[in-house]
Amino acid sequence: MHFTGRTWRPPYEANSYIIQLTSGCTYNKCNFCNLYKNEPFCLSPLSEFEEDLAEIKKYQPNARRIFFTGANPFALSYEKIKPYVLTVRDYLIKCQTIAMFSSIRDIKNKEVWQLRKLRAMGVNGLSIGVESGDDETLLLANKGYTSQDILEQCQKLDEAGIEYYFVYMTGLAGKGNGYRNAINSAKLFSKLNPYFIHVDSLTLFRDTKLYQMAQKGEFIEAGEQERVKEMQHFIENLQIRTHLFANTVSNFYPVSAYLPKERAKVLDELEQVINTFTEEEMRTYRKGLKSLG
Ligand code: SF4
């Protein structure tokens, strides 16, 4: 397999077969992110991609879902990504879905008819790290889009029938702003149809702009209790039927819930966390994090 760059897939794609379509990130400017800092965006040649498909076919001829690597392979234009998508079933005849990461910016370069065609070719399951639906937070994080962009671009996905998943990040708005971020994000997400929402919590890495801002006092980290409360407000105000997973290590307390059915139960659990652990105890947990895998 031709894996050259950092290979990063969401936890819920653990059963998908991973193939390198791209490496790196076309944007590389989010203030909290250091994932692809020294890795230019690169597209695998079709010949290499086919060799990898042949290798997957050899060991897993019945593969049903594959995942394209890279921070945002969906940045490729319709014409550029099409030959790769079409080639998948030449090798993996039973492949039903092709999933990948995408940014909101990457949907902008595609018309709804093009999205529909991609869907018909098997593209389904875009992981979108929107992080927030609150304009002040999006600006602070330098995500490069607004809440209106999220609304417009995801409505295109809804129209085309492409399933998508959101990532929300608690703590990203900084101290004292978690409530605003939660309410505005829940309001926006409630106008859309994310199949599920994956929640992470901000960890400041040294080689990021946000870390430098924190050193200069331009960004003040939210406390751990505030983050749990933010999650409560977020869950409380989500008015859609969706799954919520906050079960990776960056979350102090793992939560997974089917909303709205399990809303009351999960809000209760979070209340107990707030009443049981001190800020200090929760802070010690975050300091001990070695990786966010
Ligand atoms: S968060 Fe995603 S889009 Fe932003 S710089 Fe990191 S990899 Fe690129």
Image (cartoon, rainbow, N blue to C red):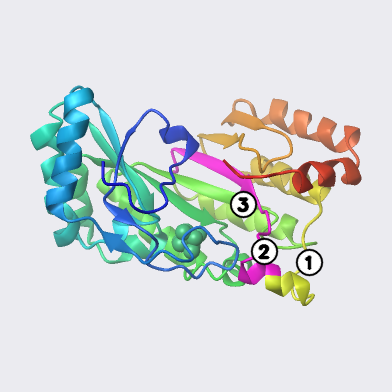
Circle 1 residue: 220
Q: Where on the picture, by quarter, is residue 93? A: top left
The reply to whether callout 2 and callout 3 are in contact (CB within 8 Å) is no
Kindly tell me whether residue 95 is visible in this rendering: no
Q: Residues within 10 Å of mark 1 (few under 14, many from 20)?
A: some
Nearer to us in this view, 55 or 149? 55
Q: Could you say whether the residue bearing mark 3 is in a helix, strand or loop?
A: strand
The residue under the point 81% across, 53% down is: 223
- The residue under label 3 is which amino acid type? Met
Circle 3 residue: 169
Q: Earlier in the sequence, mark 1 or mark 2?
A: 2
Circle 2 residue: 206
Is residue 17 toward the left or the right of residue 224 in the image?
A: left
Q: Could you say whether the residue bearing mark 1 is in a helix, strand or loop?
A: loop
Image location of residue 43, percent across then percent down: 25, 59
Q: Where on the picture, by quarter, is residue 290? A: top right
**Stretch in magenta:** 194-211
Is residue 287 toward the left or the right of residue 36 in the image?
A: right
Is residue 131 toward the left or the right of residue 227 in the image?
A: left
- The residue under label 2 is which amino acid type? Arg
Q: CA distance from mark 1 to mark 3?
A: 16 Å
- The residue under label 1 is which amino acid type? Ile
Front label number (1 vs 2): 2
